[in-house]
Amino acid sequence: MKKIVLLIIGAFIAAIITCTCGCLDSDTESEPYIDANSLLEYDISPSANVEWRTHCLACGHTYIFTSSENVIGLNKTELARRYPSWEITTFSRELVILSRVIDWYCPEHCLLYLMNDRLVIYSITEPNLDMLPMLSMNASAFSFAPSTADKLRSGIPFNSLREIDVFLSKEKQAR
Ligand SMILES: [Zn+2]
């Protein structure tokens, strides 16, 4: 009798276990499986706002350029690989912020150089912050003090062409 009761209890427990397992299986199938790694590897959306922030040590300004060109569809790993000199400070499908620090000027400035017997004014281009010659003039009308000439050989920054004009007028008068 005891044996029969035990068998019945055993069968009952087995039935419960089978049912539980079956229920778990069906639950697992109905829930979408989420891989945490796949969340980190999502791509930059075509409508994403992508900001490139350059902190310019020479002038203290932060130059921000917004463009998603060339980065749409990239994931964070691919982006980091393609732009190794930039730090990815924010990364999501819709907003990406990259930043870097350079020892150079932002496009709000122009630089005046003395090159042999020429005075050359360079602008800083957007978005690459390269130097672009804008204007060149004969330097023979000026006789700069040696210290000023030295500074001009390594480039003096100005905030506008007007400021360069004022500077050069003073240099001419001082002659
Ligand atoms: Zn600046």
Image (cartoon, rainbow, N blue to C red):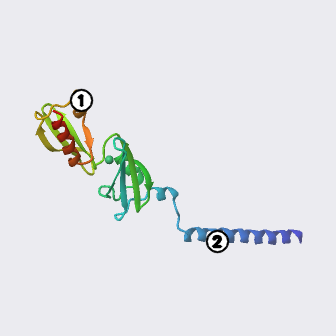
Q: Which residue is mark 2?
A: 23
How many callouts does the rendering have? 2
* CA separation in Å, label 1 and label 2: 83 Å
Going from the N terminus, do you reach mark 1 or mark 2 first? 2
Q: Return the residue nearer the eye: 65 or 109.
A: 109
Q: Return the residue nearer the eye: 17 or 43.
A: 43
- Per the image, label 1 sits on a secondary structure element best described as helix
Q: Amino acid at mark 1?
A: Asp
Q: Is residue 146 above or below residue 62?
A: above
**Could you tell me residue 170's position as x and y percent?**
20, 39
Q: Is residue 164 above or below residue 14?
A: above
Left or right, 172 with reference to 148: left
Q: Residue at x 64, y 71 (%)?
A: 23
Q: Return the residue nearer the eye: 115 or 65.
A: 115
Left or right, 169 with reference to 76: left
Q: Amino acid at mark 2?
A: Cys
Q: Is residue 139 above or below residue 30?
A: above
Q: Which residue is mark 1?
A: 150
- Per the image, label 2 sits on a secondary structure element best described as helix
Can residue 84 be seen by looking at this rendering? no
Instruction: Say which of marks 1 and 2 sits in front.
Output: 1
Q: Quadrant of residue 139?
A: top left
**Could you tell me residue 37's position as x and y percent?**
49, 55
**Could you tell me residue 114's position as x and y percent?**
18, 34
Q: Point out the image quarter for the C terminus.
A: top left
Q: Residue at x 33, y 59 (%)?
A: 72
